Amino acid sequence: MKKITIIGATGTLGLPITKQLTKKGVQVKAVVRDIKKAKEILPSTVEIVYGDVAEKDSLKTALTGSETIYLNLNTTNWDENASFQPEREGIMNVIDISKELGINHIMQIVGIDSSHPEFAVKGMEYKTNRIRKPGMEYLKNSGINYTYFHCSVFLDSLPTFIQGEDFGIIGHHQYPVFFTNTTDLADTIHNAIGNDKVYNRAFTVQGQEGISFPEAAQRFVNIYNPSIQVSEYPMETIKHIGLPSKEYEDFMEHMLTYVEQLKEEQVSQPTWDLLGKPKLTIEEFTKSLI
């Protein structure tokens, strides 16, 4: 039986990935900070243990007995002067404890921007990489086998753009995006568990079809709810939609501005050759959400 320990199993992407892996018969251990919440939303077959990437002692207990770890953390700011960032110091803590415990393999999800900066046609830097890259380099230099999955935009995020009967796209998005999804990524992760051919390598994770954000949105709502109207708004709209904090507003504006000028090319053939092709179209994945 395949086994994996997931840090970030209750997150927006981590949760559906965890569910898909358990459906495939993978024995999953979830390292979480909120045991009660995790028990409410994770499958009953998942082993749930307490652990916080800010607390090495908790990680030592939580990670004992693990062989393969999958990191599904997230960065929403680029404050390099912060004393702690989950994708920097947090990941370094995981790596330190993993070395101590003799863990064999760590996999991590990151963005396609960090492997293909040339896709940014205006030369933009995705600023959260200022936080993410030190952690990535720390893992590469640790001696632990690593695998990075550099992912395109997730179809899973599309429902978050819906307010009432309006699918609001902020910015002018014209370039192709090779949208991926958590079901296909879970297949990729499943095929990487215990596979020494993925050690110390990076893989791009994209869908098979490159289409613009507006086209993807229209095809999504055609299945999800045909009464929803797709609308495009200027970037400054983001300042008036009531996001929970100025920090998050700044992050969303930066992220959408970056995606606006991201012109992907299909570069995932090496991933498909080793770990399998993505299976779901936009329509097929949308049906799985209904």
Image (tube, rainbow, N blue to C red):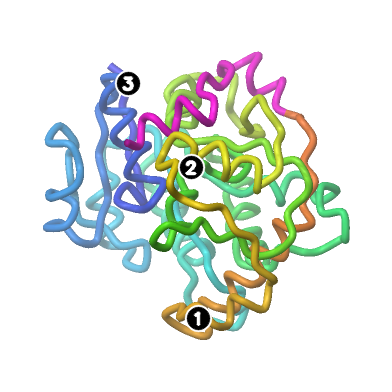
Residue 56 position by quadrant: bottom left
Placement of 169 over or under 264, stated as above or below? below
**Which percent across, then down, holds residue 67?**
36, 32
How far apart are the two marked residues, 2 and 1, measured between alpha carbons? 42 Å
- Report helix, strand or loop for mark 2: helix
Q: Residue at x 44, y 47 (%)?
A: 71
Queried whether the magenta region covers residue 273, the answer comes back as yes
Query: Where are the magenta residues, as a range?
Result: 268-290
Q: Is residue 247 left or right of residue 112?
A: left
Q: Which residue is mark 3?
A: 2
Q: Are marks 1 and 3 in contact (CB under 8 Å)?
A: no
Drawn side of residue 219 relative to residue 28, left or right: right
Eye-nearest disc, 3 or 2:
2
Q: Is residue 16 above or below residue 257?
A: above
Tell whether position 37 is magenta: no
Front-most of residues 226 and 237: 226
Q: Nearer the viewer, residue 62 or 225?
A: 225
Disc number for residue 281: none
Q: Are marks 2 and 1 in contact (CB under 8 Å)?
A: no
